[in-house]
Image (spheres, rainbow, N blue to C red):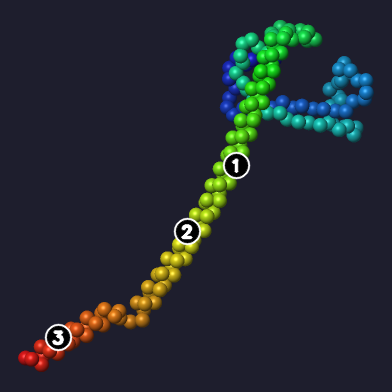
Amino acid sequence: MQAQKEAPPEPCRDKFLVQSVVTPDGTTSKDITPEMFNKEDGRVVNEFKMRVIYIPANPPSPVPEGSEEGTPPRASSQENANQNFEEVSRSLEDTKEKSSEAWSAISKLTDEKSSALQQNQRLRQELEQIRKDISKSRAGGFSLMFVMLVGLLGVLVGYFVKRG
């Protein structure tokens, strides 16, 4: 594997498909053929899709360029591979922590929204009840202040008529 020359597009949707199949004892890597992974003849083929996470390459590459298949990798390449694996592991842990924090925040906000909607409904009901109470007090006739003002005016008019 070699580092890419340019960065992949965001978000990355690349995945690796890992397939596994049960083989008889004593099977060597040369005995494995593509036909073994066909889902036919009652064979059970397990599949797992792994999401690709891109990490910027740090020179030197963990896999030396031009290495032959079957030659053991150098110790420094092994160390770089372990370091990259640890970085990926930390990245996944950080992602899981952020994901759980996000779900926690979503849950909290959903609860707050529900509470606010309930309080809003209660306030609307109270406002409607107050409006009904006010309309009932006005619907019964004249207010007490109006009656007193008319009475006072009647007394004053009577006083001036009798006097004059």
Element class at badge 2:
helix
Residue located 64% across and 30% down the image: 93
| Residue 125 x, y percent position in the rendering | 47, 66
Left or right: residue 158 compared with residue 103: left
Query: Of the residues shown, which amino acid type is indicated by label 3?
Result: Leu
Q: Earlier in the sequence, mark 1 or mark 3?
A: 1
| Mark 3 surroundings within 10 Å by alpha-carbon count, few (fewer than 14), some (14 through 19), many (20 or more) | few
Q: Quadrant of residue 62?
A: top right
Residue 61 drawn above or below residue 103: above
Q: What residue appears at the point 86 percent right and 17 percent down from the top-left corner? A: 29
Say which residue label 1 marks. 103
As drawn, 52 above or below 152: above
Along the line of sight, which residue is nearer the eye, 14 or 133?
133
Q: Earlier in the sequence, mark 3 or mark 2?
A: 2
Name which quarter of the figure residue 40 lies in. top right
- Residue that extends furthest to the bottom in the rendered view of this protein: 162
Q: Secondary structure at mark 3?
A: helix
**For mark 3, what is the residue?**
156
- Left or right: 127 with respect to 73? left
**Relative to 110, is 10 above or below?**
above
Determine the CA span between mark 1 and mark 3.
Answer: 76 Å
- Residue that lies at the very extreme toward the left in this rendered image: 164
**Which amino acid is tagged 1?**
Trp
Q: With 41 as the anchor, is 155 left or right in this view? A: left
Three-letter amino acid code of the residue under disc 2: Asn
Q: Quadrant of the N terminus?
A: top right
Q: Marks 3 and 2, how far apart in space?
A: 52 Å
Q: Where is the C terminus found, in terms of image quarters?
A: bottom left
**Mark 2 or mark 1, which is nearer the start of the sequence?**
1
Residue under label 2, please give it.
120
